[in-house]
Amino acid sequence: QQQVKQSPQSLIVQKGGISIINCAYENTAFDYFPWYQQFPGKGPALLIAIRPDVSEKKEGRFTISFNKSAKQFSLHIMDSQPGDSATYFCAASITGGFKTIFGAGTRLFVKA
Amino acid sequence: DGGITQSPKYLFRKEGQNVTLSCEQNLNHDAMYWYRQDPGQGLRLIYYSQIVNDFQKGDIAEGYSVSREKKESFPLTVTSAQKNPTAFYLCASMLNRGTEAFFGQGTRLTVV
């Protein structure tokens, strides 16, 4: 119930392509779904987040798609760039709750 | 600039020694967290604290201890009881529980 399953574990995309990372959850009480970006040797930083009252949120080249009935959400990176090469974590939490549950992470490599 | 400062960036420990990792924040956040990051395992919660002088065990608290004597400080001690302490340790804080986490730059601990 508390897990967030993330796939794929690693991803290689050509420059200019679309990177897609998927996450699935079980606990329907989750109401905050962030994505974090982490560069090597650094701490994660919030990239984009969504709440379940909307099905899609877009910020620049980054889009979250949210499917409440399927309990799935995904990150799409359009026009992927070598600078996007990083590890991406999805997460889920309950606003006011004590814990944030993180996915296992996806290592993205964008080939120039 | 507001943020979370972790020190040191790199730490080497001999087996049998206790070491303390520092985490300081000037964001005026009540909630603070310690995570451990291992390759392919995402972020695992060690301890968290919602207010001063109160903290709770996370999912992997064995071999670790914390204190929260001041709102801005949440040090983590890795004790000799922790069997496999080599990892990347991340401190985080939240303004409101269950929302955006702000991470420090991490401390890489290596047992030699």
Image (cartoon, coloured by chain):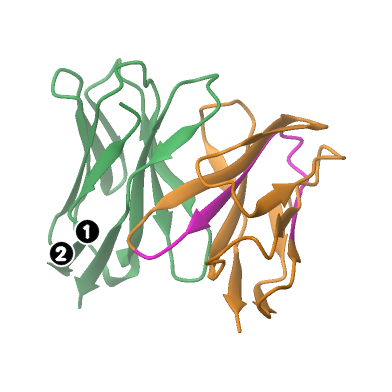
In this picture, residue A76 sits left or right of residue B7: left
Which quadrant holds the C terminus of chain A? bottom left
Q: Residue A86 location in percent, x, y? A: 35, 64
Q: Residue A97 location in percent, x, y? A: 52, 22
Q: Which residues are magenta?
A: B21-39
Viewer-proximal residue, B100 or B32? B32
Q: Which residue is mark 1?
A: A9
Instruction: Please tell me which residue is depicted at 25% across the width and 25% down the height of the picture.
Output: A26
Could you tell me which chain the residue with mark 2 belongs to? A
Q: Is residue A63 above or below residue B75?
A: above
Which quadrant holds the N terminus of chain A? top left
Please say whether residue B36 is one of the residues in the magenta stretch. Answer: yes
Viewer-proximal residue, A18 or B83? B83
Instruction: Report crowding for label 1: few under 14, some 14 to 19, many 20 or more residues within 10 A (C-alpha).
Output: some
Q: Which residue is mark 2?
A: A16
Q: Residue B79 location in percent, x, y? A: 70, 61
Tint applied to chain A in the drawing: green
| Residue type at tag 2 | Gly
Q: Residue B43 location in percent, x, y? A: 45, 51
